[in-house]
Image: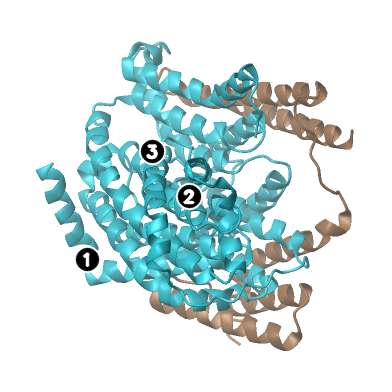
Chain colours: A brown, B cyan
Amino acid sequence: MAERSHDTIAAILIAAVCLAYLRGAQGFQAPLVADPLGPSAFPTILGWAGLILAAAQIVLVWSGRQAAEAGSASLRRFRTPLLLFGLLVGYALVLEPAGYLPATVAFVLISLLMLGEPVWRGCLVAAGFSAGFYYVFVKVLKINLPIGTLFRGW
Amino acid sequence: MAEVFSSLAYGFSVALTPANLIWAMVGSVIGTLIGVLPGIGPVSGIAILIPVIYGMNPASAMIMLTAMYYGTMYGGSTTSILVNVPGEASSVVTTLDGYQMARQGRAGAALAIAAIGSFVSGTLSILGLMLFAVPLTTLALKFGPAEYFGLMLLGLSSVTSLAGKSLVKALLSMIFGLMIATIGVDLSTGIARYTFEVPQLLDGIGFLVVAIGLFAVSEVLLAIEELGQARREPIPLGRVWLSWREFAASWWAMIRGTVIGFYIGVLPAAGATIASFISYDVEKRLAKDPSTFGKGDIRGVAAPESANNAAAVGNMVPLMTLGIPGSSTTAIMLGALMMLGVQPGPLMYQKNPDVFWGLIASMYIGNTMLLILNLPLVGLWVKILAIPERILYPLILAVSVIGVYGVSSSTTDLLLACGFGLLGYYMRKHDYPLAPAVLGVVLGGLMEQSLRQALVLSDGSYWILLQRPISLVLVVLSVVSLVSPYLIVAFRKFQGEPQF
């Protein structure tokens, strides 16, 4: 029953996104007559297709023709992935201001500690990886990495 | 035929330059490493390494990516044999007899036949690729916008039809990808669509951002959930070689696996996994004593390993000749090529013969390289298997973030990749397949353009899609490919056969 509601809620959310998407498509006015389809037709087709499929999902779930999902919904199970995801977002946000080296060393080290690695190995891996990767990207592949603005002038 | 061989000679002149040889070697080694490493699949592995090829010339980039693709296949079989953990879906069958062989102290023979089978099938099926490529490309050169639209519809529908457990969820995933592709400035009219006044969205959402987020980030998040479960220790390796008797016993299995694998690989979406299962089943049915299968029969390794490698080459046929990928990995490769300004398909044959023929020639080189490198290096791969997964996950995430930043230098793109990662995590957990979404992102823009150009020609009539014969065939095939899994089930029910 819980799985049914889960798929139904997902389908309702998808339908809501499709409705918003369709509403957005109505605002695209075509300035050219040479293009019979215009900028809104393709998004409109997609929006309607999404709506129909979301409705089909609800019908299939409630008619019992779509298998209910198995799997535990224990919150503890999601804790580590979600914490790591939060850390990843933090890393994405500080990469540019803090610069590649400090941000990467900190991200890798904190993640490793979070996953249960001992401090000494965490430090070793974080420093070794960050330095090695810097060398490959910047020196070998000539791809620029952020120097950082926070510590500039120190 | 003479033209094919002279073009192939040109391809070898491209692929055999020292730089390209090095790229092929680097690709083979990295690919095998990805295949061997726990916690990262071939699609994610290739996706996070796309930034490495950014800025390279397209021929070298493609040579490296293809070598990587082959390498991941080989690496996947190594883990199947030694730890009973398939690196990817197409190596699942290899575990049945490969792991049993390893338990009987014949790990070396299993690895050797996997490498030799991959080499033989790879080399033979490249001949098939060459034979298919030229006529198909010549046909495709006659395509107009309506046919292109039909072709992309076929690519999307065939990948969608076989992805995941639910067709509705697969279709929703495809629609999601196509919707993402509409974000940004519309090229025909200059109108900004779904950009929410964020300037960074005017160019649209890059394929790399979506691919890395949906595949790599989500794969790590999901794998972390399983962290802490018991690890399986690799079985001791022994001598990596096989006896003449074992080789002779597997020879026909390799040939049959190659033929089955190649033809299945050419069909869009029916990729390496199906090929490996079918070839295993065929060998079992042909065997005098089928009871030896599942208990360490060398043919049970030779056939699926040959089939999955042949299917990988077969998969390149629709990608290179028509520009439609037949699997997640080739979808990623298509996106990578488009990022480098090369449009795979018939025009690639005309405009970028160096990429087209260089790639075919590099397949021969990549296969040889894998055989030469992997047998001696198998001891190293076994050591890599021992790296704790929890060390790898943060590194994979860091490589993903740096890769996206290295290409776009944009924090917005990083945050988008994180968002796609979380979405991909949800999608994986609830059986929304990822491949149709990524393919939608890759093909969406071109699909819309083709439709609009076709409708300009027909003064706005959608009938043009059904009035032109090739386009009609492609649209019909798209519908058939979508409903075919249901037709097969219905047919089996009708015949009273048990279902898988």
Viewer-side residue, B198 vs B500: B500
Numbered disc 1: what chain?
Answer: B
Precedes in sequence: disc 1 or disc 3: 1
- The percent coordinates of residue B380 (x first, y second) are 50, 78
CA separation in Å, label 3 and label 2: 18 Å
Q: What separation in Å lies between label 1 and label 3 (alpha carbons)?
A: 28 Å
Residue at disc 1, secondary structure: loop
Q: Is residue B352 visible?
A: yes
| Labels 1, 2: one chain | yes
Question: Disc 1 or 2, which lies upstream in sequence?
Answer: 1
Q: Secondary structure at mark 3?
A: helix
In-front residue for pair B220/B185: B220
Please tell me which residue is depicted at 87% across the width and 59% down the height of the picture.
A76
Marks 1/3 in contact by CB < 8 Å: the verdict is no
The circle on residue B263 is 3
Q: Quadrant of residue B37?
A: bottom right
- Residue B135 position in % (x across, y down): 23, 34
Q: Amino acid at mark 3?
A: Tyr
- Residue drawn at the location 40% of the way across and 22% of the way down: B474
Please indicate whether residue A112 sits to the left or right of residue B473 in the image.
right
Of the pair B153 and A24, the residue shown nearer to us: B153
On residue B388, the disc is: none
Residue B421 located left or right of residue B272: right
Image: A19 above or below B360: above
Residue that badge 1 annotates: B16
Which residue is at 64% across, 50% downward?
A: B420
Taking the image as shown, residue B20 lies to the left or right of residue A15, namely: left
